[in-house]
Image (cartoon, rainbow, N blue to C red):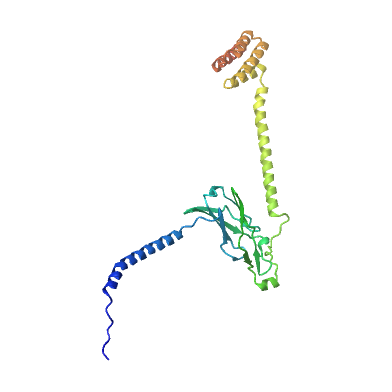
């Protein structure tokens, strides 16, 4: 048998292949670009079919008693239909409580605005203690309100396991604090409050007694003086006080001078008392000096 060789392809077919191959490659490149653009566009969130979409999650679907966890709510809002700033969320995680204010984040992704809420939950009360090795909690759905209506977003269930082993639940032991050798007739805290109240009462009594003593000392020398001396002392004290007190002190001095038979000085005191715009301190001091000079001359 001789060697068989394949026949050469026709020249026309080779020419057609060479002409169509660049077109095929170009079409394939365009198709690849279109696919890549579509995939890249798929990374951006499409406009949601409804005004608002909600998704909820828990940081732990199963935890131990007393262990804190975070509840997260994600809202995908179409700003063309709902104003994100008008969205309001109400939650109730009873018997768990929300520790602090929720963390709120806002993000714009393409035509969608995403609102993320994070609530830190904790519970150490008997209401959260599992009565069995584990307990399942079902939280009330989150209520989302916006301009056109409202909706609810259910939370996934939470399983809380007890920190006690089954043997601990079977054999329960009452643990009491260690007794102290000291004994008190009165509770120390009650005694401390009573002593503090007594100290306050003693302090108030001492203050009142000191105030009365000082007042008696201030009034004593003034009451022992003659009416004229008391009037002079009042005028001296009133030189640095208000105008009404100055006029009153000068008027009393005028009455005392009239009783003492010093009519000229009494008239001068009354004129100064009702002078305008007001009695001057220097004039009052000069009047007091004149009255004392008269008394000195009378004694002499």
Can see residue 300?
no
Residue 3 lies in quadrant = bottom left
> Going by the image, does 88 lie left or right of 226?
left
Can see residue 11?
yes
Work out whether 28 lies above or below 215: below
Residue that extends furthest to the bottom in the rendered view of this protein: 1
Indicate the quadrant containing the C terminus: top left, top right, bottom left or bottom right.
top right
Q: Position of residue 79 (x, y in %)?
A: 52, 50
Who is closer to the viewer here, 81 or 53?
81
Who is closer to the viewer here, 5 or 187?
5
Q: Position of residue 88 (x, y in %)?
A: 58, 50
Indicate the quadrant containing the N terminus: top left, top right, bottom left or bottom right.
bottom left
Who is closer to the viewer here, 125 or 55?
55
At 68% from the left and 48% from the top, the residue drawn is: 195
How many discs appear? 0
Work out whether 36 lies above or below 85: below
Residue 223 lies in quadrant = top right
Work out whether 255 lies above or below 161: above
At 64% from the left and 15% from the top, the residue drawn is: 251
Q: Position of residue 192 (x, y in %)?
A: 67, 50
Residue 6 lies in quadrant = bottom left
Q: Position of residue 132 (x, y in %)?
A: 68, 69
Who is closer to the viewer here, 19 or 124?
19
Residue that extends furthest to the right in the rendered view of this protein: 185
């Amino acid at each position: 048998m001789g060697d068989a060789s394949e026949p050469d392809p026709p020249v026309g077919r080779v020419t057609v292949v060479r002409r169509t191959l660049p077109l095929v490659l170009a079409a394939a490149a365009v198709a690849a670009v279109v696919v890549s653009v579509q995939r890249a566009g798929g990374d951006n969130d499409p406009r949601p079919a409804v005004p608002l979409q909600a998704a909820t999650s828990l940081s732990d679907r199963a935890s131990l008693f007393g262990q804190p966890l975070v509840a997260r709510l994600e809202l995908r809002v179409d700003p063309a239909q709902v104003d994100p700033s008008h969205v309001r969320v109400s939650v109730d995680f009873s018997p768990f409580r929300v520790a602090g204010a929720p963390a709120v984040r806002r993000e714009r992704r393409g035509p969608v605005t995403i609102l993320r809420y994070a609530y830190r939950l904790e519970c150490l009360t008997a209401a959260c203690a599992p009565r069995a090795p584990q307990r399942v909690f079902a939280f009330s759905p989150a209520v989302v309100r916006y301009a056109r209506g409202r909706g609810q977003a259910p939370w996934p269930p939470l399983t809380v396991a007890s920190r006690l082993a089954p043997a601990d639940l079977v054999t329960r032991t009452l643990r009491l604090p260690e007794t102290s050798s000291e004994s008190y007739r009165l509770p120390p805290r009650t005694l401390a409050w009573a002593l503090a109240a007594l100290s306050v009462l003693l302090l108030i009594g001492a203050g009142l007694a000191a105030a009365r003593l000082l007042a008696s000392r201030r009034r004593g020398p003034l009451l022992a003086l003659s009416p004229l001396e008391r009037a002079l002392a009042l005028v001296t004290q009133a030189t640095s006080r208000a105008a009404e007190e100055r006029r009153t002190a000068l008027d009393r001095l005028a009455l005392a001078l009239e009783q003492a038979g010093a009519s000229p000085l009494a008239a001068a005191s009354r004129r100064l008392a009702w002078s305008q715009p007001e009695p001057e301190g220097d004039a009052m001091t000069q009047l007091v000096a004149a009255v004392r000079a008269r008394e000195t001359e009378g004694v002499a």
